[in-house]
Image (spheres, rainbow, N blue to C red):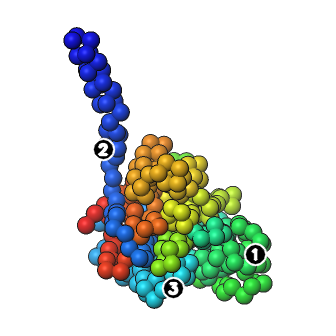
Amino acid sequence: MKKYLSLLFFSLLFLLACNPAEEKKLDIKETTTMTPAPYAIAIHGGAGTILKENITEEKEKAIRAVLDRALETGRKILEAGGASADAVEQTIMILENSPHFNAAKGAVFNYDGKNEMDASFMDGKTQNAGAIGGVSTIKNPIRLARAVLEKSDHVLLTGNGAETFAEEIGIEKVDPSYFRTESRWESLLRAKEKEAKSGFKFDQEPDFKYGTVGCAALDRKGNLAAGTSTGGMTNKRYNRIGDSPVIGAGTYANNATCAISSTGHGEYFMRYVVAYDIHARMAYGKESFQEAANTVIMKTLKDQGGSGGIIGVDKFGNVAMPFNTPGMYRGYAKPDEKKIFIYGETE
Ligand code: ASP
């Protein structure tokens, strides 16, 4: 009898040890809708210390309006049976053209006072991808990223080479002054001042890097696509390129699982191959999109000190948008549903 009792005791102990209490400890700030849909689109405008007390009502209204316009643009394409790739490109262009986000117009300044932009695009059906890094005259970097996918034999082009390719295929270029906004210029001055005083490095200051934009979409044919566009980090040096144009880190799409766009501290997203890791957990570990995305953002990344989040859509039209920063500009739309969030709110 005693033997059985101790067996029971140890079995109970074992079960308790296996219980995924870890899972419960995750401080999940996410707005997931695990309701399948014939099409779905999700967007972000960057993650970071986005707090209500730091944003005027007017600015919040303006940001919400752009996020709404971007979502509606993509939703209309998907509603009419258009391709997810078109929805992603058109949606991101709206965000790029707005001075409120750190992508194209409104991009942050690097150490030399220049705007240097990165972008990437991936097609979930073909696994084709295109990306560009360190461009400074391309009006809509996401268009060029998609053109690399469609019109070149390569995946990633950088700097002058990427600009030459753009000229050859007729992608719109602008004078570098087009990208300038006063608030980003002031951020650079503040970053430099901090650096001079305390040896500040851009990677220790979360407020100098949010605002990247991204989009993921599922169309009625079951095709997924994702894209990301950014100015990178304020005061970046040495032609630093972050995760945004790195396939598997900043962007990933695969019709077998999901489509993802990342935002946050790029160095960590590259090291932990964030977007691909979420896909792999689903593909090989049979995790749900929500589980996989939450674990990677709220555990893998957070435990290592990596800040940021992702937005994405899975092959069923479920949407996940976890982030481990105080806020993330984000939103999603499905046939009868649309939501936009800025802070840590979940409703
Ligand atoms: N991930 C981008 C980078 O590291 C920045 C961001 O998402 O805000 O370049």
Residue type at numbered disc 1: Ser
How far apart are the alpha carbons under marks 1 and 3? 24 Å
Q: Earlier in the sequence, mark 1 or mark 3?
A: 3
* Label 3 beta carbon within 8 A of ligand 1: no
Residue furthest front as drawn = 1
Identify the mark at residue 82; answer none if there is no mark. 3
In the picture shown, does residue 330 fall above or below 11?
A: below
Residue type at numbered disc 2: Lys
Residue nearest the observer in this picture, 278 or 169:
278
Residue sitting at x 64%, y 76%: 146
Instruction: Determine contact: label 2, label 1, CB under 8 Å.
Output: no
Identify the mark at residue 24; answer none if there is no mark. 2
Residue furthest top as drawn = 2
Q: Is label 1 or label 3 in front?
A: 3
Identify the mark at residue 143; answer none if there is no mark. none
Q: Is label 3 or label 2 in front?
A: 3
Residue type at numbered disc 3: Gly
- Exactly how many numbered labels are in the figure? 3
Instruction: Determine contact: label 3, label 2, CB under 8 Å.
Output: no
Identify the mark at residue 152; answer none if there is no mark. 1
